Amino acid sequence: MKEHKDRMAAYQRILLKLSGEALMGDLAYGIDPDIVQAIAQEIAEVVQSGIQVAIVVGGGNIFRGVKGSAAGMERATADYVGMLATVMNAITLQDALERAGVPTRVLTAIEMKEVAEPYIRRRAIRHLEKSRVVIFGAGSGNPFFTTDTTAALRAAEINAQVLFKATKVDGVYDSDPRTNPQAKRYQTLTYGHVLTQDLRVMDGTAIALCKDNNIPIVVFDLAVRGNIRRAAMGEPIGTTVGGFCEVS
Ligand code: UDP
């Protein structure tokens, strides 16, 4: 623990976006408890190094609004179900974090005060200042949005210095590395390039919000143990969206 404290942290406050799929591991649906515990352990190490950590969790491992509406549900209703799915993930992650010794609060954009606190921006910031991990559940509270956009929104609201998009790939490529062996991974990318080339780092609304608020996005592979800590310490991993374009 001391070893982490001695290293210089690159950031004071980070926003980590975890997709629902990240909690699923190799399962076809739901939550893999071992994966969640491993993620919690990594987050604990980051908190122990003195960095304030806020998290937005997705819900795609349980329910997605678009899928529900494709199956005939009203889109807004399906999105509300999706938002509720994120709360299950949030509470599960909270449980894992607290077992890893990290005080954690879940704040939901849809009020459900028996299980979590309502989202209040100032309260979220206060929790972070007290070194509690804050998990934002229920997305933005609005249908037709995504948890990526929620992550950008909350990052701006809490003045996070960076948004980490922990995902299944190790960065952003100029073409699909699964079909093109010559595909090159970007080290850095501009917001404009992501938008005009439709690079699908996050949805366009999320990218635009980060651009407007000058929040860099670091895209990295969550499956590599230690990557959350590496990114938090400012090590150059994955792809950073924000500055200029450079391939590795
Ligand atoms: N959702 C929503 N509004 C929000 C955030 C999420 O309606 O502000 C719904 C939407 O239906 C989405 C689902 O919640 O499909 C789960 O979120 P998301 O798909 O972003 O999760 P992830 O892909 O990160 O697992």
Image (cartoon, helix red, strand yellow):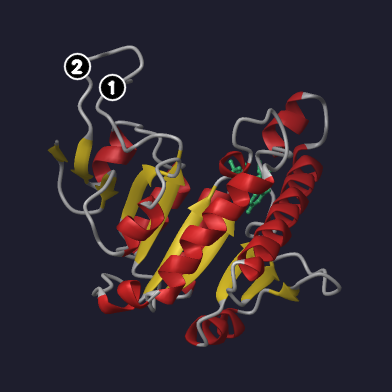
Using the rendered view, name the quadrant where residue 156 is placed: bottom left
Q: Residue at x 21, y 37 (%)?
A: 186
Specify the quadrant that holds the N terminus.
bottom left
**Name of the residue lying farthest toward the front:** 2
Question: Looking at the image, which is closer to me, 76 or 47?
Answer: 47
Q: Quadrant of the C terminus?
A: top left
Q: Position of residue 152 (x, y in %)?
A: 46, 59
Q: Is residue 119 above or below residue 244?
A: below
Three-letter code for the amino acid on which mark 2 is drawn:
Gln
One can see residue 161 in this view? yes
Task: Pinpoint residue 240: horizontal percent, then vertical percent.
Answer: 26, 49
Q: Quick check: is the Cβ at mark 1 less than 8 Å away from ligand 1?
A: no
User: Which is nearer the N-term, disc 1 or disc 2?
Assistant: 1
Q: Is residue 58 visible in the rendered structure shown here?
A: no
Task: Check residue 175 in the rendering and tell me which mark sits there, or answer none.
Answer: 1
Q: Secondary structure at mark 2?
A: loop
> On the image, numbered disc 2 is attached to which residue?
182
Residue type (three-letter) at the residue carrying disc 1: Ser
The answer to whether mark 1 and mark 2 are in CB contact below 8 A is yes
For image coordinates 71% across by 29% down, the residue present is: 67
Which quadrant of the figure has residue 193? top left
Label 1: element kind: loop
Of 58 and 70, the residue lying toward us: 58
Marks 1/2: CA–CA distance: 8 Å
